[in-house]
Image: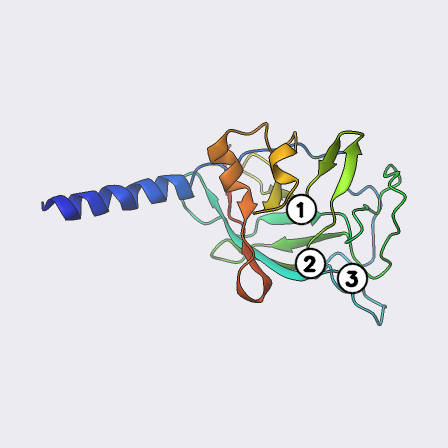
Amino acid sequence: MAAGTLAGSKALAKTLVEACQLTPAQTEGPFYPVKDQPDEDNDLTFVRGSSASAKGKIIFVTGQVTDQNCSPVPNALVEIWQACVTGRYNHPNDTNPQPLDPNFQYWGKAVTNGSGIYKFKTIIPGAYPADTDWIRPPHIHFKAHKVGYHELTTQMYFAGNEYNDKDKILMALPPSSRTQVTVTIGEKGLCTFNLALAKV
């Protein structure tokens, strides 16, 4: 085999291994939804019954749920929850004095298709103070589960945010894992966030 072909094969194999590494778990945080809501779909920018849209920059988050062998996981439930553009969660334990957005859904769910693909329409959440010396960067919480797989709870961050490098939760991960949970916003607000679950 030619040296160039061998090198290319090794690079491809390395990419596939990295792509199917299990997604690093992160804390659920204190604001996992505790109240049911009438609108639980995958579009968080519009609340059923409202005539206005949520404030903030709209993004489209999509990705594939796989197992550690790169096999798609269809019919997996993916949940997301997050703060609105002011950095506040719609949760009774959030003492952030910033206003809530009545036109933002805050929490939603999607089920993966036959290829393991899920999709959400949402906004970039605001940063907020977690302590006197700690500002949490914009992030979205994820939970993915299906019978036969270990439940995954993690968080998704946005590349280049000024608060990323000092975030105690993100920085607790090794550098390679930080890369796995950080996305770049592409054309038309598209973000790709793949999730890899471990089989039971």
Distance from Cα at disc 1 to Cα at disc 3: 16 Å
Label pair 2/1, CB-CB below 8 angstroms: yes
Q: Position of residue 127 (x, y in %)?
A: 74, 45
Pointer 3 residue: 55
| Three-letter code, disc 1 | Ile
Disc 2 packing (10 Å; few <14; some 14–19; many ≥20):
many
Left or right, 73 with reference to 158: left
Front residue of 16/100: it is 100
Give the Cα distance between marks 2 and 3.
10 Å
**Labels 2 and 1: the sequence-earlier one:** 2
Q: Is residue 19 above or below residue 112?
A: above
On the image, which quarter does residue 165 sit in? top right
Q: Earlier in the sequence, mark 1 or mark 3?
A: 3
**Depicted 55 relative to depicted 149: above or below:** below
Q: Which residue is mark 1?
A: 140
Q: Tell me the residue that label 2 is attached to.
A: 122
Give the mark nearest the N terminus, 2 or 3: 3
Q: Are marks 2 and 3 in contact (CB under 8 Å)?
A: no
Q: Nearer the viewer, mark 1 or mark 3?
A: 3
For disc 3, the neighbor class at 10 Å (few under 14, some 14 to 19, many from 20) is some
